[in-house]
Amino acid sequence: MLPLPSDAQAARFLAQAGFAATEADIATLKSVGYNAWLDLQFVAPRTESHWDWLTRNGYATDAKKNANFDGFPNSVWCKFITSPDQLRQRMVLALSEIFVVSAVGATLPWRTMMLAAYADVLEDNAFGTFRGLLEAVALSPAMGTFLAMRGSKNEDGKGRQPDENFAREVMQLFTIGLVQLNLDGSVQTSGGRPIETYDQTAVTQLARAFTGWDFDTANAAGADGSFMRRPMVNSAANFSTGAKTVLGNTIAAGVDGPTALRQALDTLANHPNVGPFFGRQLIQRFVCSNPSGAYVQRVAQAFNNNGQGVRGDLKAVLRAVLMDPEARLIDAGVSSSGKLREPVLRFVQVARSIKLTSAGQWTIPDTSDPETRLGQSPFFSPSVFNFYRPGYVPPNSAMTAAGVTAPEFQLLNEVTVTGYLNFMQTLLTTGQGDAKPDLTDDMALSTDARAMVARQALLLGGGSISDATQQRIAAAVTTIAANTDDGKINRSRAGWMLLLACPEYQIQK
């Protein structure tokens, strides 16, 4: 049992388990402790769904069915920046970067509502079981469209074959990966070569098990888009009959499409790779980029058994990720500790810290442009491989020689550094879209630059920003006169801006 946290420890945990830490959040965590805080988050009331938000704001009408995702980013930012169930929302972001569905390239009618329904699927299943999540994702219209399982038909004897896209990616990216893993995530080898988890025959067989699925509607271009929030349905006429062998397990001839899909997903979800493969990616999304084998193994064990014989209990997995000794203790000499905060996390963290508020529409413009904005926008990944790969190692660096994975560095270059800083400067000065910052709390401390910077550094860095760095920032801030309201607000902005540019902040320890 860990002791109750200090202010810095609480702020650090809240940045891992959620998006940001307010003084009230810190006080709550210090009062109840880590495990009780997690318990509270697991039962926290759900906020308005993305589907309902878009419907309430007029985006779910026939006139909008061909709109290019109008309103969907608004709903995402509203949730991430304002929802009190921070752990659930942080899990949605993590899952959206593992079970990727991207808006990029989507042109079909009702695409806005399709993405909203998919975000709701991730939220619905964030604290459930991995197996339940996997099926909900597989049958969602969004995934069916993105990876072409929707409309995949049986062999016709004339050259037509089932589409293999989803079958390949559900193995490679969502469940088992390319090579056999030990429980600690290390690669199993034979004769000095990695042992592959599947071959082309497995892809072909699995694709046959995934045939016959389509939207639950007779008119996908009609005036009713509600089918986008219903699981796809199976057409027996388009299902590939006959026996199928998936990773050594046989799906008997004669079973129907839904049964074949469930049996195939059971096989994938029960594969021994899933615990270390999925668990390592969750560690990367929440805590550190290059977790030790021991850390991965402990999380994989929690995945395999939550202590009550349940496999894939996502609450148990999250607790294992966040409460692991390597997550709670900091050792500056350990090269595998910490991670580069991805741009979206930096934005949401500072937005919560400066109490960014909107009149209700959250019209924050698209953040994908790397030159002027963040170079990243949730649910707008350039491909199914996310914004960055979990195994990415920055080239021509000390990390290359050490073999240290650092996924978020794939987004880091001269262009994105400048774009991020310009974006943050605009955020602190005029806001983004209709969302405006509230710097009142900072202005109240601005005449004491050291105290103001210390507060900002605590909320952002959770103890990782050194006193020396804070003193240098405070000295720079002090050069701005604070005898007028304009001076006070400029001091506040300067403090935030210098901290946001600071490497000690950008690397989350």
Image (tube, rainbow, N blue to C red):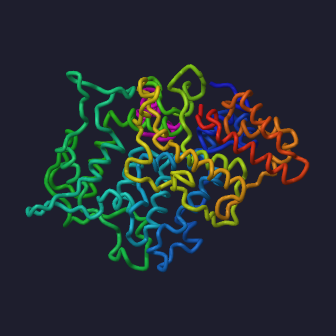
Which stretch is magenta? 297-318
* Residue 33 visible (yes or no): yes
Quadrant (top left, top right, bottom left, bottom right) of the C terminus: top right
Q: Residue at x 20, y 40 (%)?
A: 199
In this picture, is 301 found above or below 118?
Answer: above
Asked which quadrant contains residue 145, the reply is bottom left
Q: Residue at x 63, y 63 (%)?
A: 362
In this picture, is 125 found above or below 15?
Answer: below
**Residue that extends furthest to the right in the rendered view of this protein:** 483
Instruction: Examine the structure image and report whether residue 469 is included in the region drawn in magenta.
Output: no
In the rendered structure, the answer to whether residue 483 lies left or right of residue 406 reads right
In the rendered structure, the answer to whether residue 393 lies left or right of residue 195 reads right
Quadrant (top left, top right, bottom left, bottom right) of the N terminus: top right
Choose between 25 and 310: the one closer to the eye: 25
In this picture, is 509 found above or below 346?
Answer: above
Asked which quadrant contains residue 303, the reply is top left
In this picture, is 253 found above or below 231?
Answer: above
Q: Position of residue 417 (x, y in %)?
A: 56, 44
